[in-house]
Image (spheres, rainbow, N blue to C red):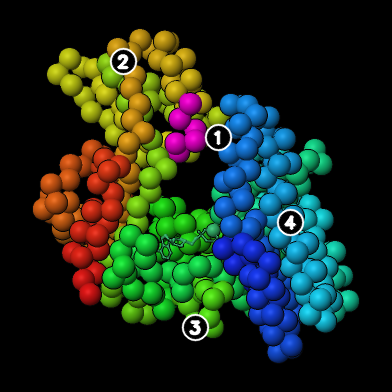
Amino acid sequence: MGLIVQKYGGSSVADAKKVKNVARRVIKTKEEGNDLVVVVSAPGDMTDELIDLAHQITETPHPREMDMLLTTGEQRSIALLAMAIWDQGHSAISFTGPQAGIRTSNIHDRKARIEGVHAERVRQGLSDGKIVIVAGFQGLTEDDAIATLARGGSDTTAVALAAELKAEICEIYTDVEGVFTADPRIVPEARKLDSISYEEMLEMASLGAKVLHSMAVEYANKFNVPLHVRTSFNSNPGTMVIKEVEGMKGVVVRGVTQDKNQAKISIFGVPDRPGIAYKIFQAIGAAGINVDMIVQGIGKDEKATISFTVPKADLRSAMDIVKEVGKEIDTTDITTDENIAMVSVVGIGMKSHSGVAAEMFGALSDEGINIQMISTSEIRISCVIEEKDTERAVVAIHNKFLPS
Ligand code: ADP
Ligand code: ASP
Ligand code: MG
């Protein structure tokens, strides 16, 4: 038997009874002869509640202190789980992200990336025969400060540890039975996938399927860590995220996703000359803001309209930058729209199939849903629509490509 890394999400450790249940599952895996590292998230909705609390103090919480606050959620979970394991007769040791040797980039407030793992203490814990428990979503910057990863980042902590420790498998325990063809909370007919390729999972995660964090999938792919997404509420097998295997291309659309976390910025009256787009997006990129979709149209008057999407959380800072750059390049108007959503279809089969875009647009048109922006890659097609139409759009697209 080998080394297994397990990650339990917030719903699995939401209260004392659930923590005890996780302790029982963990001990069972250990008793089957495995070494075990367990990564846990903050209980229930605690991260949301802490963010809310900070905003009751100030509109602009200090980023370093925000991380000091947010990391307490995970810290509570590791201590409770370790206590539960000791209480059930096994030995455990809990570590915060910094104690577990997770090193991050020098940036705060849910923007840090894992840059390295110095897992000596974790290895020591394992060789002492203990179940090692690590707080997800956090690490240490080069300034010796605690920093948080993006939301959902406990998945990434688990995969980074699994890669460093060369674990046999990384099991992600969550509140659904695996990765589905669409969010089962929106599409009740969605089906659990037995397996999905890293490439498809990466697209789905980046496009809003929050069952796995995209960075976790990126690392898993890079370091060849097999992922098993499954539920902590029973022992049914879930979904294996693996390298593409023969036959996977036979399915054109693997899944449908939605993302309501984007906002649209439109800049009107942009002079149509070289270097303008560079100026705008260089400034936004330098602020660490991720631009997803960009559309530029030229009007009759030789002036362009540039529209693009940014995460809602970054809208304010993106607008500040755009207004500054806008002054220099003499635009006529700048508008924002937060009531948008992006719906997407993903599948490696699209590489060798045409006509998927037309079918997707048809599904939206049948529902009378207007498309504001479109973007495509080899294995995905995304449309920006009005936010209020999201659920209807996802169900219609799912019915079209993945009928039950
Ligand atoms: P955890 O707290 O365990 O990390 P998350 O809430 O981050 O759990 O992720 C699980 C949720 O992801 C599910 O409850 C489900 O609503 C949502 N989800 C979105 N898209 C999908 C999908 N394609 N398959 C499964 N779950 C999905
Ligand atoms: N607790 C963090 C969040 O809610 C990290 C995680 O759950 O993965 O985003
Ligand atoms: Mg999650």
Report helix, strand or loop for mark 2: strand
Residue drawn at x 46%, y 74% as measured from the top left: 177
Q: Dot 4 corresponds to which residue?
A: 76
Disc 1 target residue: 288
Tell me if the residue at label 1 has its CB under 8 Å from ligand 2: no
Q: Position of residue 10 (x, y in %)?
A: 59, 60
Image coordinates of residue 353 in percent, x first then y, are: 22, 65
Specify which label sits upstream in the sequence, 2 or 3.
Answer: 3
Label 3 – label 1 distance at C-alpha: 40 Å
Distance from the alpha carbon under mark 2 to that under mark 1: 24 Å
In terms of sequence position, does the residue under pointer 2 or pointer 4 come before the other? 4
Q: Amino acid at mark 1?
A: Gly
Q: In terms of depth relative to the viewer, which is nearer, 305 or 237?
A: 237
- Provide residue 74's location: percent of width, then percent of height: 69, 55
Q: Marks 2 and 4: which is nearer the front?
A: 4
Q: Is residue 33 above or below residue 376?
A: below
Q: Amino acid at mark 3?
A: Asn
Residue highlighted by disc 3 = 236
Classify 10 Å Cα crowding around label 2: few (below 14), some (14-19), many (20 and above): few
For the C terminus, the quadrant is bottom left
Q: Of the numbered discs in the image, which one, if any, rests on residue 333?
A: 2
Distance between the alpha carbons at the discs numbered 2 and 4: 48 Å
Q: Is residue 9 visible?
A: no
Percent across and percent down for residue 125 are 85, 71
312 in magenta = yes
Give left or right: position of 359 versus 175.
left
Which of the marked residues, 4 or 3, is nearer the chain's N terminus? 4
Q: Look at the image and give the residue range highlighted in magenta.
A: 311-316
Q: Is residue 403 visible?
A: yes
